[in-house]
Image (cartoon, helix red, strand yellow):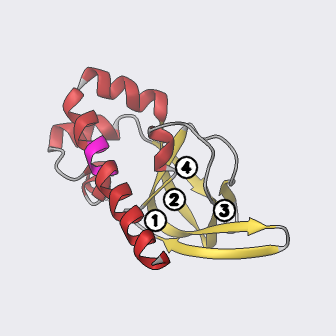
Amino acid sequence: MSISTLLKRVQMFANLDEAELEQLASICIKKQAAPGELILKRGTTGQEMYVVADGSVDVFIKSGDQIRNLVVLGKGQVIGEMALIDQGHRSASVKATKDGATLYLIQSDKFYELCTANNHIGFIVMRNLAIDIAFKLRHRNLDIA
């Protein structure tokens, strides 16, 4: 599967046309994560996000000796996407599952350069991120009520 075909499956990149997906693909860097390898660590600052191309990753929070598994993500899903917005602290840790994972890294500075060159890409991606964040906040608030 080509990078563009994978990116087309990613909700965050919905409504980008083929040329825009190709532009986005041109800034992706392929990475392999060994089984159990830590990819992102909670509390560290982020300057990149990842798209899972193959395999899967565990998203978890560790507090002392306690580990709370949040979700397992697979092909076409993203991790670290908030780094594209604020380069703030990671809210969870992520490691490759027992079979490892193939990922595509997107660095925030390269993404910003792309969005400066093509404002439509930036508008669509940021709109999709805002929709996703709004959904998650509403869902979280419903769980609390």
Query: Callout 2: helix, strand or loop?
Result: strand
Q: Is residue 138 above or below residue 89?
A: below
Gap in angstroms between the C-alphas marked 3 and 1: 12 Å
Q: Locate residue 108 relative to residue 32 in the image: left or right.
A: left
Determine crowd level at label 4: few under 14, some 14-19, many 20+ residues with C-alpha closer than 10 A. some
The residue under label 1 is which amino acid type?
Asp
Gap in angstroms between the C-alphas marked 2 and 3: 9 Å
Of the two numbered discs 1 and 2 on the same chain, state the one appearing first in sequence: 1
Gap in angstroms between the C-alphas marked 1 and 2: 5 Å
Q: Is residue 131 above or below residue 99?
A: above
The residue under label 4 is which amino acid type?
Lys
Q: Position of residue 25 (x, y in %)?
A: 33, 41
Query: Callout 4: helix, strand or loop?
Result: strand
Q: Position of residue 6 (x, y in %)?
A: 31, 57
Q: Position of residue 24 (x, y in %)?
A: 31, 38
Please name the residue that numbered disc 4 is placed on: 31
Please name the residue that numbered disc 3 is placed on: 34
Range shown magenta: 125-129
> Residue 128: within the magenta?
yes
Q: Label for residue 102?
A: 2
Residue occupying the point 69% across, 45% down: 44
The residue under label 3 is which amino acid type?
Ala
